[in-house]
Image: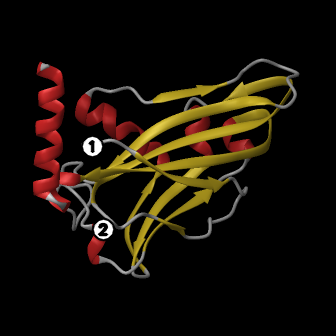
Amino acid sequence: MGDSIYQGQIPFDAGKLSDPFAINRDFALDGLMLKLNLTGDTAGSVSADPEGPMSIIKTVRIEADGDIIQEIDFETLSMLPYFFDGVIPIKSLITAINETDVELGYCAVPLMFNAQGLYPGFASYLLAPIYNALNLRILWGDASDLGTGYTVDSGYLEVSTLPNYMVTNPPVYLKRMRTIQKNLTD
């Protein structure tokens, strides 16, 4: 897996399916890094959902040339790193009461294209350059999915690609690796 490349943000829109968000097709992709940020208010009493901020995203959908090639609920997606690698997802949801215009919660979740057969049609990467259009869409929930006592004023899902340079362009990748090795030994 290489460095992540920032792609942009999908704005929170309670209860709606987001507009298609174009994913860079310059490289084969090992996956996407998805980072959720929410801001808003808490009431005099709050009761947080155990899944925290992950429950506000219902599904993550990848479309290629107009067809859905992957759709998975976000809570399941957030647990895949734990199931396969023992990595606990990064997540936080505020439980302080009577807060105004604060960061309510965040989480960071990788969507990997090599999750042991969970992504039919993918080898260990997605050959993004073969598609004319590659889009990400999010089905958003609403503030009540966080628990009781929350109001979401704004939020977004930050999207970064995880390119696979070895598959996309092996000579460039190997040259890059030799440069890194050389710098480490100097």
Q: Is residue 123 visible?
A: no
The label shown at residue 171 is none
Mark 1 lies on a secondary structure that is loop
Q: Depth check: 64 or 15 in front? A: 64
| Residue positioned 32% across, 77% down in the render | 131
Query: Which one is closest to the eye, mark 1 or mark 2?
Result: 1
C-alpha gap between disc 1 and disc 2: 15 Å
Residue drawn 41% across and 64% down? 24
Q: Residue at x 10, y 55 (%)?
A: 171
Q: Position of residue 111 (x, y in %)?
A: 37, 48
Q: Which residue is mark 1?
A: 2
Marked residue nearer the N-terminal end (1 or 2): 1
Q: Position of residue 173 (x, y in %)?
A: 16, 49
User: Relative to residue 141, is residue 33 drawn left or right?
Assistant: left
Q: Nearer the viewer, residue 73 or 81?
A: 81
Task: Name the image quarter holding the C terminus.
Answer: top left
**Which of the 4 quarters of the picture holds residue 1?**
top left
Residue 69 placed where, x, y %?
A: 35, 70
Image: 53 above or below 46: below
The three-letter code of the residue at mark 2 reads Ala
Which of 51 and 14 lies nearest the eye of the viewer?
A: 14
Any mark on residue 128, and which? 2
138 sits to left or right of 160: right
- In this view, 135 is above or below 49: below
Name the amino acid, label 1: Gly
Is 154 situated left or right of 99 in this image? Answer: left
Residue 122 in the image: state x and y as whole percent: 21, 63
For the view shown, which residue lies furthest in the front direction? 186
At label 2, counting other C-alpha atoms closer than 10 Å, the crowd grade (few under 14, some 14-19, many 20 or more) is some
Q: Secondary structure at mark 2?
A: helix
